[in-house]
Amino acid sequence: MGSASADDSRRRIQDWTMKLVKAGIFGFLPYLIAAASFAVLVKNLAQEIDAFRASEEAAALRELAEKTTLAAAALRPALEKSDFRAIHDFGGERRKEGVRLSIVSARGGLVFDSHSAPNENRLERPEIKDAAETGAGRAIRNSRLYTAKAAGEWIVRLSVPYKTVGEGIRKAQRNMVLAGAAGAAGLLCVFLFIAKLVARNRALAREKEQKAKLLANMEKVEEFRKTFISDITHEIKTPVTGILGVADLLEAPVQEADRATLIAMLRHEASRLDALVQDILSLAHLEHAEGMMHIANENLGNILRSAAQRKTSSASAAGVRLIVQPTPLLYAPCDARLVEQALVNLIGNALEHSGSDEVKISLAGRDGFAVFAVEDRGRGIPAKWREHLFERFWRGDDAREGGTAHTGLGLAIVRQTARLAGGDAWFEAPLRGGARFLMKIPLDGGKQKENNNGK
């Protein structure tokens, strides 16, 4: 039980990993890790510099505080005796060392300053205030270090320029920055290598996927070829068998009336074979027609009326009223001959198989497309047939009965024509019954605007 559960967990992890790889998540992972590592490096470098600065400042303040304590002890007798010469001499020696000496009274007044500072109250200075309250104080201010020490009623303060500390800090900063830059460069090289490796792996994965798709397409094409040849063989065999059978009968002596019937049958089967060949050639032409189409901005209303005119006699012979509804002025870049033939196929399909006494043909503009519709009010199409309507060589049971010359390619030609033009063809079942076949192709927006402005 435990082993099976572990295997299931492992498989789930692998599945999720593959999903992430396919989604391209791992493609960004090296860059994310590099950015995060660089950010951590910069943060740590800044923290180290700050820590070093604080350490150096603390050490300098401790050293200066020790000197201040010694100075306070040395100056206290002179302060108590008001021996200003001794105080002045002591301050001069400190000045030579680059150290500033200040002596402040308990009230904050400046008693002595080796650098001749203005006489102003010093009690508000933090190091003086701390020394007055606790006996010692220190501060960093105005690029200087200050330490103060109480000496009886006075406060002795020493200060030095910050540069005495800053030079060491700046040197350390430079060294740390150089070390950080070297580390960042090394890190960048590592992740560039990883990124290159990941890119290569992704390229290999894409290549493998493309080869798999190519193989699948080749298998699909081969399967289609076999099916197509099988379908063509079957479809051609039927009229050929009929023609051969009639020819055999005609070789024997027959009465004149029977001869006329046999000849009519021969013509019917020959017409059926001819229609099949023509439809196969049309479909083959459409599948390789992209470079051979005669594209122009065509008036779609004229194309629709021309297609209806070609089927007028067939409609009259079938006792069907063919209604061409008013058409808007629409233009589209298309091959007029192919679009007209597709409409002829749709109209012929309605005339032959709908059982309707009326067929309506219309054209409308919708969402940047011209939509042709051929609608009848006949018996409709069973739901089980609808998904097969545009398949090659598919025919409903009614088309297989009664010796019809229907080839099963008419609607396939319609859809191929529409898709070649950038549109599509589909079927709808009207609520009131019957059938509606639609075909759409993209409109030419510039031509519509031109015609609308000219109205």
Image: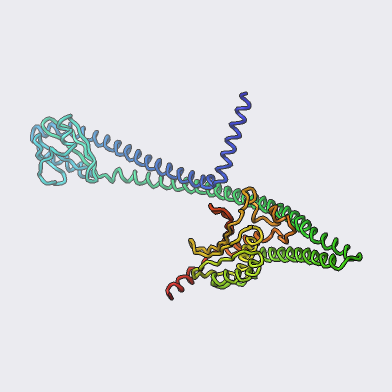
Residue lying at the far bottom in this picture: please name it.
454
Q: Tell me which colouring the rendered structure shows.
A: rainbow
Toward which corner of the image does residue 158 lie, by quadrant?
top left
Nearer to me, 407 or 37:
407
Nearer to me, 53 or 331:
331
Nearer to me, 206 or 61:
206
Q: Is residue 97 visible?
A: no
Say left or right for 449 vs 372.
left
Q: Is residue 54 visible?
A: yes
The answer to whether 107 is drawn above or below residue 439 in the figure is above
User: Residue 206's spot in the image, x, y percent?
Assistant: 61, 51
Residue plotted at (67% across, 50% down):
212
Residue lying at the far top in this picture: please name it.
1
Residue plotted at (49% across, 64% down):
365
Say left or right for 51 vs 359.
left
Say left or right for 280 vs 176.
right
The answer to whether 419 is drawn above or below residue 143 in the figure is below
Toward which corner of the image does residue 422 lie, by quadrant?
bottom right
Nearer to me, 225 or 28:
225
User: Residue 323's spot in the image, x, y percent?
Assistant: 56, 66
Toward which corner of the image does residue 20 lie, by quadrant?
top right
